[in-house]
Image: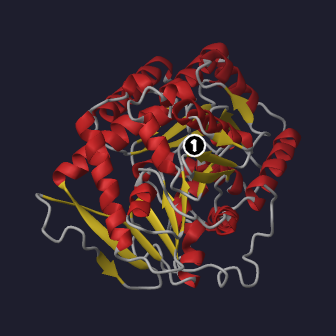
Amino acid sequence: MSIVDLRHPPGYHSAMGRLVMVSNRVPSAADLDPENRGAGAVGGLVSAVRASLVETGGMWVGWSGRASPRRSPAHRAVSRTPGPVELATIDLTADESSLFYTGFSNRTLWPLLHSFIERMQIRHDTYRAYRRVNRRYAQALSATLSEGDVVWIHDYHLFSVAHELRRMGWKGKIGFFLHTPFPAADVFSVLPWAGELLASMLAYDLIGVHTRRYLLNLVDAFGVELGGDWNGFSFAYGGSASRLGVFPIGIDPQAFRKAALACRESLPRMLGLPPDEKIIIGVDRLDYTKGIPHRLQAFSTMLDHHRDLRGAVTFVQISNPSRARVPEYVREREAVERLTGRINGRYSEGSWVPVRYLYRNFSQETLAAFYRDAHVNMVTPLRDGMNLIAKEFVASQVADPGVLVLSSLAGAAAELTDAVIVNPFDVDGSASSLYKALSMPARERRSRWERMSRVVESRTASWWSRSFTEQLLATAERSGYTLS
Protein backbone atom coordinates (compact mmCIF):
# COMPACT_ATOMS: atom_id res chain seq x y z
CA MET A 1 0.00 0.00 0.00
CA SER A 2 1.58 3.29 -1.03
CA ILE A 3 1.52 6.49 0.99
CA VAL A 4 -0.42 9.11 -0.94
CA ASP A 5 -1.17 12.80 -0.59
CA LEU A 6 -3.03 13.49 2.65
CA ARG A 7 -5.72 15.67 1.13
CA HIS A 8 -8.75 14.20 -0.58
CA PRO A 9 -8.19 14.48 -4.35
CA PRO A 10 -10.61 16.50 -6.50
CA GLY A 11 -13.83 14.59 -7.05
CA TYR A 12 -13.00 12.03 -4.35
CA HIS A 13 -16.28 12.36 -2.49
CA SER A 14 -18.37 12.92 -5.60
CA ALA A 15 -17.22 9.49 -6.81
CA MET A 16 -18.62 7.93 -3.66
CA GLY A 17 -22.22 7.63 -2.62
CA ARG A 18 -23.40 8.48 0.87
CA LEU A 19 -21.03 7.04 3.46
CA VAL A 20 -22.87 5.13 6.20
CA MET A 21 -20.77 4.34 9.26
CA VAL A 22 -21.86 1.57 11.63
CA SER A 23 -20.34 0.94 15.06
CA ASN A 24 -21.40 -0.38 18.43
CA ARG A 25 -21.97 3.15 19.75
CA VAL A 26 -22.55 6.41 17.94
CA PRO A 27 -20.58 9.59 18.64
CA SER A 28 -22.37 12.73 19.71
CA ALA A 29 -23.71 15.24 17.20
CA ALA A 30 -21.18 17.76 18.57
CA ASP A 31 -18.31 15.37 17.81
CA LEU A 32 -19.45 15.15 14.20
CA ASP A 33 -19.78 18.93 13.79
CA PRO A 34 -17.12 19.97 11.23
CA GLU A 35 -16.45 23.13 13.26
CA ASN A 36 -15.39 21.05 16.27
CA ARG A 37 -11.72 20.53 15.44
CA GLY A 38 -9.86 20.59 18.73
CA ALA A 39 -7.43 17.77 19.52
CA GLY A 40 -9.53 16.80 22.48
CA ALA A 41 -12.87 17.04 20.74
CA VAL A 42 -13.07 13.61 19.15
CA GLY A 43 -11.47 10.20 19.03
CA GLY A 44 -9.37 8.86 16.18
CA LEU A 45 -12.18 7.13 14.33
CA VAL A 46 -14.44 10.20 14.30
CA SER A 47 -11.66 12.54 13.20
CA ALA A 48 -10.71 10.08 10.45
CA VAL A 49 -14.13 9.88 8.80
CA ARG A 50 -15.83 13.15 9.70
CA ALA A 51 -14.90 14.96 6.48
CA SER A 52 -16.12 12.07 4.31
CA LEU A 53 -19.37 11.86 6.26
CA VAL A 54 -20.08 15.58 6.02
CA GLU A 55 -19.20 15.88 2.33
CA THR A 56 -21.31 12.87 1.29
CA GLY A 57 -24.28 13.76 3.51
CA GLY A 58 -23.47 10.65 5.48
CA MET A 59 -25.04 8.84 8.40
CA TRP A 60 -23.76 7.05 11.51
CA VAL A 61 -25.73 4.08 12.81
CA GLY A 62 -25.27 2.44 16.21
CA TRP A 63 -26.56 1.72 19.66
CA SER A 64 -27.90 4.73 21.56
CA GLY A 65 -26.39 3.47 24.81
CA ARG A 66 -29.85 3.14 26.34
CA ALA A 67 -31.02 -0.16 27.81
CA SER A 68 -34.79 -0.49 28.17
CA PRO A 69 -36.47 -3.04 30.45
CA ARG A 70 -38.05 -4.82 27.49
CA ARG A 71 -38.18 -4.63 23.72
CA SER A 72 -40.90 -2.38 22.34
CA PRO A 73 -43.23 -3.58 19.58
CA ALA A 74 -41.56 -1.09 17.26
CA HIS A 75 -38.05 -2.31 18.06
CA ARG A 76 -36.97 -2.26 14.42
CA ALA A 77 -37.44 1.48 14.21
CA VAL A 78 -34.47 3.81 14.62
CA SER A 79 -34.31 7.28 16.09
CA ARG A 80 -32.83 9.74 13.61
CA THR A 81 -31.12 13.01 14.48
CA PRO A 82 -30.56 15.36 11.54
CA GLY A 83 -27.43 17.47 11.18
CA PRO A 84 -24.29 17.69 9.02
CA VAL A 85 -24.07 13.97 9.73
CA GLU A 86 -27.33 12.18 10.46
CA LEU A 87 -27.35 9.93 13.53
CA ALA A 88 -29.52 6.81 13.50
CA THR A 89 -29.69 4.92 16.78
CA ILE A 90 -31.30 1.78 18.12
CA ASP A 91 -32.08 0.93 21.73
CA LEU A 92 -31.24 -2.43 23.26
CA THR A 93 -33.03 -4.15 26.09
CA ALA A 94 -31.21 -4.59 29.39
CA ASP A 95 -30.85 -8.32 28.62
CA GLU A 96 -29.43 -7.61 25.17
CA SER A 97 -26.95 -5.14 26.58
CA SER A 98 -25.83 -7.63 29.21
CA LEU A 99 -25.58 -10.67 26.93
CA PHE A 100 -24.42 -9.08 23.67
CA TYR A 101 -22.18 -6.28 24.92
CA THR A 102 -20.90 -7.22 28.38
CA GLY A 103 -21.14 -10.95 27.72
CA PHE A 104 -20.12 -12.05 24.24
CA SER A 105 -18.38 -8.89 23.00
CA ASN A 106 -16.35 -8.04 26.10
CA ARG A 107 -15.99 -11.36 27.94
CA THR A 108 -15.64 -13.67 24.93
CA LEU A 109 -14.45 -11.88 21.79
CA TRP A 110 -12.25 -9.23 23.45
CA PRO A 111 -10.02 -11.71 25.34
CA LEU A 112 -10.04 -14.13 22.39
CA LEU A 113 -8.91 -11.52 19.86
CA HIS A 114 -6.13 -10.43 22.23
CA SER A 115 -5.05 -14.07 22.76
CA PHE A 116 -6.11 -14.20 26.42
CA ILE A 117 -8.02 -17.45 26.01
CA GLU A 118 -7.76 -18.22 29.73
CA ARG A 119 -10.00 -15.18 30.33
CA MET A 120 -12.64 -16.22 27.78
CA GLN A 121 -16.16 -16.95 28.88
CA ILE A 122 -17.96 -19.40 26.55
CA ARG A 123 -21.73 -19.26 26.88
CA HIS A 124 -24.24 -20.26 24.21
CA ASP A 125 -26.84 -17.75 25.41
CA THR A 126 -24.45 -14.80 24.93
CA TYR A 127 -23.59 -15.99 21.42
CA ARG A 128 -27.27 -16.29 20.49
CA ALA A 129 -27.79 -12.74 21.80
CA TYR A 130 -24.81 -11.55 19.76
CA ARG A 131 -26.31 -12.90 16.55
CA ARG A 132 -29.74 -11.47 17.40
CA VAL A 133 -28.32 -7.99 18.03
CA ASN A 134 -26.25 -8.12 14.84
CA ARG A 135 -29.52 -8.91 13.06
CA ARG A 136 -31.13 -5.88 14.69
CA TYR A 137 -28.33 -3.64 13.45
CA ALA A 138 -28.93 -5.03 9.96
CA GLN A 139 -32.66 -4.37 10.29
CA ALA A 140 -31.93 -0.78 11.31
CA LEU A 141 -29.60 -0.37 8.35
CA SER A 142 -32.03 -1.97 5.91
CA ALA A 143 -34.66 0.57 6.91
CA THR A 144 -32.36 3.54 6.29
CA LEU A 145 -30.13 2.62 3.32
CA SER A 146 -30.58 4.03 -0.16
CA GLU A 147 -29.21 2.81 -3.47
CA GLY A 148 -25.60 3.92 -3.92
CA ASP A 149 -24.81 4.09 -0.20
CA VAL A 150 -21.41 2.81 0.91
CA VAL A 151 -21.54 1.00 4.25
CA TRP A 152 -18.50 0.83 6.54
CA ILE A 153 -18.91 -1.37 9.63
CA HIS A 154 -16.48 -1.29 12.54
CA ASP A 155 -15.09 -3.78 14.99
CA TYR A 156 -15.71 -7.13 16.64
CA HIS A 157 -19.13 -6.28 18.06
CA LEU A 158 -20.56 -6.44 14.53
CA PHE A 159 -18.84 -9.30 12.69
CA SER A 160 -22.14 -10.68 11.33
CA VAL A 161 -24.02 -7.53 10.30
CA ALA A 162 -23.13 -7.78 6.61
CA HIS A 163 -24.25 -11.43 6.50
CA GLU A 164 -27.65 -10.43 7.88
CA LEU A 165 -27.86 -7.42 5.57
CA ARG A 166 -27.11 -9.56 2.51
CA ARG A 167 -29.86 -11.98 3.55
CA MET A 168 -32.22 -8.98 3.53
CA GLY A 169 -31.27 -8.30 -0.09
CA TRP A 170 -28.67 -5.52 0.14
CA LYS A 171 -26.17 -5.79 -2.74
CA GLY A 172 -24.29 -2.52 -2.23
CA LYS A 173 -20.74 -2.00 -0.99
CA ILE A 174 -20.03 -3.10 2.60
CA GLY A 175 -16.62 -2.79 4.22
CA PHE A 176 -15.44 -3.96 7.64
CA PHE A 177 -12.51 -2.81 9.75
CA LEU A 178 -11.23 -4.68 12.79
CA HIS A 179 -9.64 -2.33 15.34
CA THR A 180 -8.28 -5.14 17.55
CA PRO A 181 -5.62 -7.72 16.70
CA PHE A 182 -6.67 -10.91 14.98
CA PRO A 183 -5.04 -13.89 16.75
CA ALA A 184 -3.36 -17.00 15.42
CA ALA A 185 -5.75 -19.53 13.87
CA ASP A 186 -5.34 -22.10 16.64
CA VAL A 187 -6.28 -19.43 19.20
CA PHE A 188 -9.36 -18.29 17.28
CA SER A 189 -10.41 -21.92 16.82
CA VAL A 190 -10.99 -22.18 20.58
CA LEU A 191 -14.28 -20.37 19.92
CA PRO A 192 -17.00 -22.96 19.27
CA TRP A 193 -18.55 -20.72 16.60
CA ALA A 194 -15.27 -19.75 14.89
CA GLY A 195 -16.23 -21.19 11.49
CA GLU A 196 -19.71 -19.70 11.60
CA LEU A 197 -18.43 -16.21 12.38
CA LEU A 198 -15.68 -16.39 9.78
CA ALA A 199 -18.12 -17.57 7.11
CA SER A 200 -20.43 -14.65 7.92
CA MET A 201 -17.52 -12.21 7.47
CA LEU A 202 -17.22 -13.20 3.82
CA ALA A 203 -20.35 -11.16 3.19
CA TYR A 204 -18.10 -8.07 3.32
CA ASP A 205 -16.59 -6.74 0.10
CA LEU A 206 -13.47 -5.54 1.96
CA ILE A 207 -12.05 -6.53 5.34
CA GLY A 208 -9.31 -4.34 6.79
CA VAL A 209 -6.85 -4.89 9.64
CA HIS A 210 -3.93 -2.86 11.05
CA THR A 211 -0.93 -5.05 10.20
CA ARG A 212 0.25 -7.74 7.85
CA ARG A 213 0.59 -10.17 10.77
CA TYR A 214 -3.13 -9.81 11.60
CA LEU A 215 -4.00 -10.29 7.94
CA LEU A 216 -1.98 -13.51 7.72
CA ASN A 217 -3.60 -14.76 10.92
CA LEU A 218 -7.04 -14.05 9.46
CA VAL A 219 -6.23 -15.80 6.18
CA ASP A 220 -4.92 -18.79 8.11
CA ALA A 221 -8.09 -18.92 10.23
CA PHE A 222 -10.27 -18.83 7.10
CA GLY A 223 -8.27 -21.70 5.66
CA VAL A 224 -8.33 -23.80 8.82
CA GLU A 225 -12.04 -23.30 9.53
CA LEU A 226 -13.52 -23.09 6.04
CA GLY A 227 -11.09 -24.28 3.42
CA GLY A 228 -11.53 -21.88 0.51
CA ASP A 229 -8.92 -20.17 -1.63
CA TRP A 230 -6.57 -17.23 -1.00
CA ASN A 231 -4.89 -15.58 -4.02
CA GLY A 232 -2.89 -12.97 -2.13
CA PHE A 233 -5.64 -10.34 -2.36
CA SER A 234 -9.04 -12.00 -1.89
CA PHE A 235 -10.37 -15.00 -0.03
CA ALA A 236 -13.01 -17.07 -1.82
CA TYR A 237 -15.33 -19.61 -0.25
CA GLY A 238 -18.78 -20.97 -1.04
CA GLY A 239 -19.47 -18.65 -3.93
CA SER A 240 -18.40 -15.49 -2.09
CA ALA A 241 -15.10 -13.62 -2.11
CA SER A 242 -13.84 -10.80 0.08
CA ARG A 243 -10.85 -8.54 -0.48
CA LEU A 244 -8.49 -8.36 2.52
CA GLY A 245 -6.14 -5.45 3.19
CA VAL A 246 -3.78 -3.81 5.65
CA PHE A 247 -4.78 -0.28 6.70
CA PRO A 248 -2.86 1.03 9.74
CA ILE A 249 -4.97 3.69 11.43
CA GLY A 250 -3.43 7.08 12.18
CA ILE A 251 -4.14 10.27 14.09
CA ASP A 252 -4.42 13.99 13.31
CA PRO A 253 -0.80 14.91 14.17
CA GLN A 254 -1.22 18.63 13.56
CA ALA A 255 -3.99 18.81 16.14
CA PHE A 256 -1.76 17.23 18.79
CA ARG A 257 1.20 19.40 17.88
CA LYS A 258 -0.97 22.50 18.06
CA ALA A 259 -2.36 21.47 21.44
CA ALA A 260 1.11 20.69 22.80
CA LEU A 261 2.29 24.14 21.79
CA ALA A 262 -0.76 25.96 23.10
CA CYS A 263 -1.73 24.11 26.28
CA ARG A 264 -0.50 25.80 29.45
CA GLU A 265 -1.04 22.71 31.57
CA SER A 266 2.23 21.28 32.85
CA LEU A 267 2.77 17.80 34.26
CA PRO A 268 5.64 18.82 36.59
CA ARG A 269 3.64 21.77 37.90
CA MET A 270 0.46 19.74 38.40
CA LEU A 271 2.34 17.07 40.37
CA GLY A 272 4.71 19.45 42.13
CA LEU A 273 7.81 17.83 40.63
CA PRO A 274 11.25 19.51 40.56
CA PRO A 275 12.06 21.00 37.14
CA ASP A 276 15.07 18.70 36.64
CA GLU A 277 13.24 15.45 37.48
CA LYS A 278 12.81 13.02 34.62
CA ILE A 279 9.29 11.83 33.86
CA ILE A 280 8.13 8.50 32.44
CA ILE A 281 4.49 8.48 31.39
CA GLY A 282 2.04 5.70 30.64
CA VAL A 283 -1.48 6.43 29.37
CA ASP A 284 -3.98 3.61 28.93
CA ARG A 285 -7.52 2.47 29.37
CA LEU A 286 -7.50 0.35 32.51
CA ASP A 287 -7.55 -3.00 30.72
CA TYR A 288 -5.73 -6.26 31.34
CA THR A 289 -4.38 -6.23 27.77
CA LYS A 290 -2.38 -3.05 28.40
CA GLY A 291 0.35 -4.63 30.53
CA ILE A 292 0.31 -1.98 33.25
CA PRO A 293 1.51 -4.33 36.05
CA HIS A 294 4.38 -5.60 33.85
CA ARG A 295 5.35 -1.99 33.13
CA LEU A 296 5.36 -1.06 36.82
CA GLN A 297 7.45 -4.14 37.61
CA ALA A 298 9.97 -3.10 34.95
CA PHE A 299 10.21 0.36 36.53
CA SER A 300 10.71 -1.21 39.96
CA THR A 301 13.43 -3.50 38.59
CA MET A 302 15.20 -0.53 37.03
CA LEU A 303 15.22 1.26 40.40
CA ASP A 304 16.76 -1.89 41.94
CA HIS A 305 19.53 -1.99 39.31
CA HIS A 306 20.19 1.77 39.15
CA ARG A 307 19.99 3.23 42.64
CA ASP A 308 21.24 6.60 41.34
CA LEU A 309 17.83 7.11 39.68
CA ARG A 310 15.97 7.06 42.98
CA GLY A 311 14.72 10.56 43.62
CA ALA A 312 15.57 11.56 40.03
CA VAL A 313 12.74 9.98 38.01
CA THR A 314 8.97 9.73 38.47
CA PHE A 315 6.66 7.29 36.75
CA VAL A 316 3.24 8.80 35.98
CA GLN A 317 0.59 6.21 35.12
CA ILE A 318 -2.70 7.61 33.83
CA SER A 319 -5.42 4.96 33.68
CA ASN A 320 -8.75 5.82 32.12
CA PRO A 321 -11.66 4.01 33.82
CA SER A 322 -12.97 1.19 31.62
CA ARG A 323 -15.76 -1.40 31.90
CA ALA A 324 -15.86 -0.84 35.64
CA ARG A 325 -18.60 -3.44 36.22
CA VAL A 326 -16.83 -6.31 34.48
CA PRO A 327 -15.14 -8.49 37.13
CA GLU A 328 -11.89 -8.90 35.16
CA TYR A 329 -11.47 -5.13 35.05
CA VAL A 330 -12.24 -4.70 38.73
CA ARG A 331 -9.49 -7.20 39.52
CA GLU A 332 -7.06 -5.46 37.17
CA ARG A 333 -7.63 -2.13 38.90
CA GLU A 334 -7.07 -3.73 42.30
CA ALA A 335 -3.85 -5.37 41.09
CA VAL A 336 -2.48 -2.11 39.68
CA GLU A 337 -3.32 -0.19 42.86
CA ARG A 338 -1.71 -2.85 45.09
CA LEU A 339 1.45 -2.87 43.00
CA THR A 340 1.63 0.92 42.98
CA GLY A 341 1.33 0.93 46.77
CA ARG A 342 4.08 -1.68 47.14
CA ILE A 343 6.51 0.21 44.90
CA ASN A 344 5.85 3.51 46.64
CA GLY A 345 6.15 1.88 50.04
CA ARG A 346 9.50 0.33 49.12
CA TYR A 347 11.26 3.21 47.36
CA SER A 348 9.73 6.52 48.56
CA GLU A 349 12.23 8.88 50.18
CA GLY A 350 11.37 12.24 51.73
CA SER A 351 9.14 14.11 49.30
CA TRP A 352 9.92 11.78 46.38
CA VAL A 353 7.16 9.33 45.42
CA PRO A 354 8.30 7.09 42.56
CA VAL A 355 4.86 6.29 41.05
CA ARG A 356 2.06 8.80 40.60
CA TYR A 357 -1.10 6.88 39.71
CA LEU A 358 -3.98 8.90 38.25
CA TYR A 359 -7.21 6.95 37.75
CA ARG A 360 -9.22 9.45 35.74
CA ASN A 361 -9.79 10.89 32.29
CA PHE A 362 -7.97 13.88 30.85
CA SER A 363 -8.81 15.83 27.72
CA GLN A 364 -6.62 15.17 24.71
CA GLU A 365 -5.35 18.77 24.86
CA THR A 366 -4.08 18.11 28.38
CA LEU A 367 -2.62 14.75 27.39
CA ALA A 368 -0.75 16.41 24.52
CA ALA A 369 0.88 18.71 27.08
CA PHE A 370 1.71 15.74 29.31
CA TYR A 371 3.33 13.92 26.37
CA ARG A 372 5.28 17.09 25.60
CA ASP A 373 6.63 17.19 29.16
CA ALA A 374 7.58 13.52 29.43
CA HIS A 375 11.09 12.22 28.82
CA VAL A 376 9.85 8.69 28.10
CA ASN A 377 6.49 7.26 27.08
CA MET A 378 6.01 3.57 27.92
CA VAL A 379 3.47 2.01 25.56
CA THR A 380 3.82 -1.65 26.49
CA PRO A 381 0.57 -3.57 25.95
CA LEU A 382 0.58 -7.35 26.07
CA ARG A 383 -1.50 -7.19 22.87
CA ASP A 384 -2.93 -4.19 21.03
CA GLY A 385 -4.51 -3.65 17.63
CA MET A 386 -2.60 -0.43 16.94
CA ASN A 387 -2.26 1.85 20.01
CA LEU A 388 -2.62 5.46 19.00
CA ILE A 389 -1.02 6.71 22.25
CA ALA A 390 2.35 5.93 20.68
CA LYS A 391 1.57 8.12 17.66
CA GLU A 392 0.09 10.87 19.84
CA PHE A 393 3.30 11.00 21.89
CA VAL A 394 5.43 11.34 18.76
CA ALA A 395 3.19 14.12 17.40
CA SER A 396 3.31 16.05 20.69
CA GLN A 397 7.11 16.39 20.84
CA VAL A 398 7.60 20.06 20.03
CA ALA A 399 11.01 20.85 21.55
CA ASP A 400 13.59 18.40 22.91
CA PRO A 401 12.01 15.07 21.93
CA GLY A 402 11.47 12.25 24.39
CA VAL A 403 11.84 8.52 23.78
CA LEU A 404 9.06 6.07 22.92
CA VAL A 405 9.38 2.64 24.57
CA LEU A 406 7.00 0.44 22.58
CA SER A 407 5.79 -3.14 22.92
CA SER A 408 6.62 -5.46 20.05
CA LEU A 409 3.06 -6.80 20.49
CA ALA A 410 1.36 -3.49 19.61
CA GLY A 411 0.36 -2.93 16.00
CA ALA A 412 2.20 0.40 16.07
CA ALA A 413 5.53 -1.46 16.34
CA ALA A 414 5.18 -2.45 12.67
CA GLU A 415 5.38 1.25 11.72
CA LEU A 416 7.31 2.98 14.51
CA THR A 417 10.41 0.85 14.19
CA ASP A 418 12.65 3.61 15.63
CA ALA A 419 11.03 3.33 19.03
CA VAL A 420 12.87 1.34 21.70
CA ILE A 421 11.06 -1.95 21.08
CA VAL A 422 10.53 -4.25 24.08
CA ASN A 423 8.91 -7.58 24.93
CA PRO A 424 6.54 -6.58 27.76
CA PHE A 425 6.64 -10.09 29.25
CA ASP A 426 10.42 -9.75 29.70
CA VAL A 427 10.50 -7.56 32.80
CA ASP A 428 14.31 -7.51 33.12
CA GLY A 429 14.73 -6.69 29.44
CA SER A 430 12.11 -3.93 29.66
CA ALA A 431 13.92 -2.49 32.71
CA SER A 432 17.20 -2.36 30.75
CA SER A 433 15.46 -0.74 27.77
CA LEU A 434 13.81 1.81 30.04
CA TYR A 435 17.21 2.78 31.47
CA LYS A 436 18.56 3.04 27.91
CA ALA A 437 15.68 5.38 27.02
CA LEU A 438 16.28 7.61 30.05
CA SER A 439 20.02 7.89 29.30
CA MET A 440 19.79 8.20 25.50
CA PRO A 441 21.89 11.05 24.03
CA ALA A 442 19.99 14.00 22.55
CA ARG A 443 21.28 13.38 19.03
CA GLU A 444 19.97 9.81 18.97
CA ARG A 445 16.66 10.85 20.52
CA ARG A 446 16.13 13.45 17.84
CA SER A 447 17.08 11.19 14.92
CA ARG A 448 14.74 8.44 16.14
CA TRP A 449 11.93 10.95 16.65
CA GLU A 450 12.41 12.51 13.20
CA ARG A 451 12.04 9.14 11.48
CA MET A 452 8.95 8.23 13.52
CA SER A 453 7.48 11.68 12.95
CA ARG A 454 7.65 11.21 9.18
CA VAL A 455 5.55 8.07 9.54
CA VAL A 456 2.99 9.74 11.81
CA GLU A 457 2.77 12.82 9.58
CA SER A 458 2.22 10.79 6.40
CA ARG A 459 -0.08 8.00 7.61
CA THR A 460 -2.71 10.17 9.23
CA ALA A 461 -6.29 9.41 10.21
CA SER A 462 -7.60 10.94 6.98
CA TRP A 463 -5.08 8.93 4.93
CA TRP A 464 -6.35 5.77 6.60
CA SER A 465 -10.00 6.62 5.91
CA ARG A 466 -9.36 7.53 2.30
CA SER A 467 -7.20 4.44 1.67
CA PHE A 468 -9.92 2.15 2.97
CA THR A 469 -12.84 3.76 1.18
CA GLU A 470 -10.93 3.95 -2.11
CA GLN A 471 -10.18 0.25 -1.89
CA LEU A 472 -13.79 -0.51 -1.00
CA LEU A 473 -15.07 1.44 -4.00
CA ALA A 474 -12.62 -0.45 -6.22
CA THR A 475 -13.89 -3.89 -5.22
CA ALA A 476 -15.86 -5.76 -7.84
CA GLU A 477 -19.64 -5.66 -7.71
CA ARG A 478 -21.15 -8.73 -6.08
CA SER A 479 -23.25 -10.93 -8.27
CA GLY A 480 -24.98 -12.35 -5.20
CA TYR A 481 -24.49 -13.68 -1.72
CA THR A 482 -25.05 -17.39 -1.48
CA LEU A 483 -24.03 -18.25 2.09
CA SER A 484 -26.93 -19.78 4.00
Which residue is depicted at the point 17% across and 71% down?
74
Locate residue 9, reporting x and y percent. Answer: 76, 79
Q: Residue at x 64, y 16 (%)?
A: 428
| Residue depicted at x 29% and y 54% | 133
Q: In terms of secondary structure, where does tag 1 sit?
A: loop
Judging depth in this view, the residue of 231 and 213 nearest the camera is 231
Question: Is 234 in front, or is 410?
Answer: 234
Mark 1 residue crowding within 10 angstroms, few (<14) / some (14–19) / many (20+): many
Residue 260 place in picture, x, y as percent: 64, 61
| Quadrant of image for the N terminus | bottom right
Q: Is residue 101 above or below residue 17?
A: above
- Left or right of 188 in this view: 129: left
Q: Which residue is mark 1?
A: 385
| Residue 374 appears anywhere in the view | yes
The residue lying toward the viewer, choosing from 165 and 418, is 165
- Placement of 287 over or under 201, stated as above or below: above
Q: Quadrant of residue 302?
A: top right
Query: What's the colour scheme?
Result: secondary structure
Q: Quadrant of residue 463?
A: bottom right
Residue 398 in picture, x, y percent from top left: 74, 58
> Which is more toward the observer, 430 or 55?
55
Residue type at tag 1? Gly
Q: Is residue 56 left or right of residue 375?
A: left
Quarter where residue 127 is shown:
top left
